[in-house]
Structures are given as C-alpha cells and as structure tokens.
Image: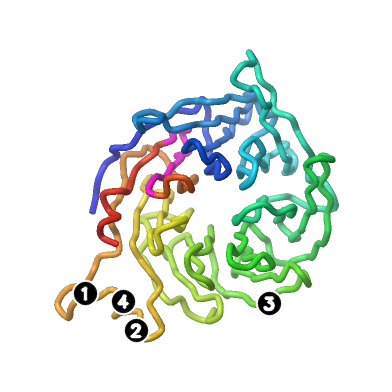
Amino acid sequence: MQGGSSGIGYGLKYQARCISDVKADTDHTSFITGTLSLREENEVHLIRLSSDGTELVCEGLFSHPNEIWDISSCPFDQRIFSTVYSTGESYGASIWQIPELYGELNSPQLERITTLDGEVGKIKSIIWWPSGRHDKLISIDEQNISLWSLDLSKKTAQVQSQESAGLVAQSGGAWDPHDMNAVAVTCESSIQFWDLRTMKKTNSIEHAHVRNVDYNPKKTHILMTAEDESGIRMWDVRKPKVPILELPGHTHWTWTVRCNPEYDGLILSSGTDSTVNLWLASAPSNNESITESFVESPSKRIDPLLQSYSDYEDSIYGLAWSSREPWIFASLSYDGRVVVESVKPFLSRK
C-alpha cells in the first residue's frame, strides 16, 4: 500500500542521520536526535510529542562539539545519552547528561559524564542493554568489541573486557534483549555472534552487505537484517545457514530495520530510496512452512507490506519506535526532517 505522509514534522537546522527513543521517559513520548554538520556547531534536540498528539515540541536544544553519527538514550535515566562522533581525524564516544533544570536555563549546556577513550579504535556504535537498568555498555569499533563498566556516580567508564574481531571491519550491532550475554555484530561479509562472558565468537551468519540488525524483542532467537540490495531477512540465530523469511525491502539500499517493542511481527525499514516501509511479518511456527505462514487460504496470500511512507526528499537513516506508545514511530531523513507517524490503523490486522 503506497501512501504519502500524514505524520507530524519537525525540522533540524542541519543534516542528521540518527534518532533514539527516550525509553526512560514514561510520562512523555520523546525522542532525541543529533546533527551532522561539518562546519557548524552541532546540536542535540530533545523532542516530545504534545499531549494531544498534534505537534512535536522542542523540549531541549543543546550544543554538541562534533558531528553526531550515532545517538542512544540511556534506557533507565531519561537525562543520560551516548553519542558517537567524528573528530575530523577519528571517531570518539561520550556519555552525556542533560542538566536537571534545563527548561529554566537560558543556554543549557550538556555535561560530559565520561569519554569512552580506552584502548579502542574507530568507534562505530555504542549499545545499551535494552531491557532495564544495567551498569554495562558495549562499544563496537572497526576491529574490537569492548564491554565497559559504567559508574554514573563516579562519572567513569572502564573497559572490563575486550576482544579483537580479527581482520573483519565491524560497523555496528545489537544486544540480544533476551540474553544479557549475547551480542550480534555486523561486519563486511558476515554477522558475528559474541558471548560477553568469554568474549568469544559463538556463531556467525555468512552474509555480505548487512547494514543494520535488530532482535525481535517478543520472540527469542529471531534477528532481522537490513541489506544493501537484498532487502530484509529474518533469521533464527540457531539455524544461521538460511533465512527463515525474506522481504523485498526497498528500491535502493535498505539501511535500517526496527522491530516493534510490543507488537510481534510489526517491522519498520528505511533506506536510500527516501521511503519508510511498515511490514507485518512474523516468524513461522515450528509446524508450518515459511510459505504457509503467509497464506490465509489456498487462493489468497497476505501481502506483508502494510504501508509505504514516501513523503520524503532524502535518504532515511534514522528510525525509532516509541516504547511508551508502541504504535508511534519517528523517522529522520538526512536533510534533518523528523516525522512522527501512528500505525494504529494497521493494528487491527494483527
């Protein structure tokens, strides 16, 4: 189903590519995003959906010293977040805190709690444990995976354990919400699975050009991948040889995939074709084949594409479901445009 956008828009001053749900804000539907300007002072925007759901309001605007390539909100403290940024010559990462009374200050400044600058290389991604309070962080750089011990009271972060990925170039990953010790890492030609207790690889999916991965939070062992040209695949990580489901993806590179935090099988994807797609695609049960899972009757197949949002003018790298209202998502196109949409009309089909 094709469609434009009936969503609520918000414009950033500069280009941008990352946005995060503020999961710890249980009173508001909030997102945090950061800009990617080479020459200007970059900005972090804390955005909230108004109580009547009709507009996006800037709750906080803060300066940030470098181009922001990745941003993630702390899942247990709404005022804390991480950024991965370019320093011109390399990449760094820091943990930041929004000042307590930022709404009453003329020019509120972010407090840099700590910098993740141990024996690590070009950091690509910072990952928080997705399922509640945890004093550990993961950093993924081109060559290493590092487990950090974070002490917010002492404002320190120390590498607890680290392992080299070898000659593969790592680009990002996801922490399994069902297993605190399991992490999936995207590489040039594979997805590597790590056990954080031993810092050893446990398995891999040999598959090239994966841009993004996301675990299904409602079903164990299920992983989604977004790929350059091949679209979207669903995997059972216990059977890594072949995907259990394939979706067509986008007309150009598929860049991001996100599983809904509450509704199993509801999936978002975005890409460089300036489109966001909404899918309904659950993993087949053990007693049915992949083909059968999309058949209502012998004569009628279900189209897994529920909606295509195409009212964008640039590539869409940022996608985030709201944890508080899981029928709402935010998308971010490279030209700095945030759009919030509701998928409530499609929930009746589940």
Query: In the image, which is nearer the foreground, mark 1 or mark 3?
Result: 1
Report the amino acid beneath label 2: Glu
Q: Is residue 332 magenta?
A: yes
Quadrant holding the N terminus = bottom left
Q: Which residue is mark 1?
A: 296
Q: Position of residue 192 (x, y in %)?
A: 64, 70
Which quadrant of the figure has residue 85? Answer: top right
Q: Is residue 146 left or right of residue 21?
A: right
Position of the C terminus, as image quadrant, is bottom left
The residues tagged by marks 1 and 3 sit, at their Cα atoms, a distance apart of 38 Å
Q: Which mark is residue 91?
A: none
- Kindly identify which residue carries mark 2: 288
165 or 23, which lies in front? 23
- Mark 4 or mark 3, whichever is nearer to me: 4
Marks 1 and 2, the one that precedes in the sequence: 2
* Magenta highlight range: 327-338
User: Of the residues shown, which amino acid type is indicated by label 4?
Assistant: Ser
Nearer the observer: mark 2 or 3; the answer is 2
Residue at (37, 56) in percent of width and height: 250
In the current view of this chain or complex, which residue is farthest to the top?
106
Is disc 4 placed on a helix, strand or loop?
Answer: helix
The reply to whether callout 1 and callout 3 are in contact (CB within 8 Å) is: no
Q: What label sits on residue 202 in the rendered view?
A: 3
Q: Residue at 60% of width from left, 60% of height from top?
A: 174
Q: Earlier in the sequence, mark 4 or mark 3?
A: 3
Which residue was labeled with disc 4? 293
